[in-house]
Amino acid sequence: MRMGLPAAVLAALLLAGCGDTPVAEAPVTPAAITADAVGQYCGMNLADHPGPKGQVHVRGRSRPVWLSSVRDTFAFLMLPEEPKSIRAAFVSDMGRATAPDAAAPDAWVEARQAWYVTGSTAPAAMTGAELYPFAEEAAARAFASAHGGQVRRFADITPAEILEADGDDTAGPAPDAGAAGPARQTAEGHHAH
């Protein structure tokens, strides 16, 4: 008898009905920066803050976590005390910016897919050097030709460059949130300014 296939289909349907099969989440789309978007670490209004920015979508939260720099975005993703149930992370696509300090509020690229220019001479919004993200490799290389620096991928940027650098460009960009930086938090998880 050839009843194996219908029985397998019935079993799969029964399991799906019991909640044993994970439900696929809808893809996350980046949010445009609004007047009430405030940086997680610095408390600055992103609409008034120059340079590239980031947003992280955490499972269970209806609004993204806003980050006032790409460096802070990396720190949020790397710090062990921050949430790890990340649905998506986006950074400004500087290939659509009018200048290094003028990121478009609705131009985003998925952080793990972006091309980054590190160590450039382009001005940083806060202290130290910024990571400049691009959706296209050619745009990143053109930026590096104009402003110096290296073109790298997300996986090539280490926690030491983001979390341990303290204004020394040889070790990587300095923390965006001032001299204290995101790696130096108080026991309560707040920044020590």
Image (cartoon, rainbow, N blue to C red):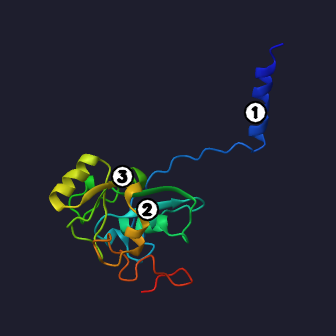
Q: How far apart are marks 1 and 2 (CA)?
A: 38 Å
> Along the horizontal axis of the image, is 48 left or right of 110?
left
Report which residue position mark 1 lands on: 13
Residue name at image x 22 percent, y 51 percent: 141
Tag 3: amino acid: Ala
Q: What element carries label 1?
A: helix
Residue found at the very far top of the displayed protein: 1
Residue found at the very far bottom of the displayed protein: 193
- Label 2 environment density (alpha carbons within 10 Å; few <14, some 14–19, many ≥20): many
Residue name at image x 38 percent, y 61 percent: 157
84 lies above or below 1: below
Residue toward you, 173 or 132: 173
| Rendered image quadrant of residue 171 | bottom left
Report which residue position mark 3 lands on: 114
Q: Distance between the residues labelled 2 and 3?
A: 14 Å
- Camera-near label (1 vs 3) is 3
Quadrant showing the C terminus: bottom left
Residue toward you, 188 or 68: 188
| Marks 1 and 2 in Cβ contact (< 8 Å) | no
**Numbered label attached to residue 55:** 2
Where residue 103 appears, x then y in whole percent?
A: 28, 61
Q: Is mark 3 on a helix, strand or loop?
A: loop
Q: What element carries label 2?
A: strand
Residue 78 visible in the shown view: yes
| Rendered image quadrant of residue 36 | bottom left
Residue name at image x 78 percent, y 43 percent: 18
Where residue 99 appears, x then y in whole percent?
A: 20, 61
74 lies above or below 6: below
Give the mark nearer the N terminus: 2 vs 3.
2
Tag 2: amino acid: Gln
| Marks 1 and 3 in Cβ contact (< 8 Å) | no
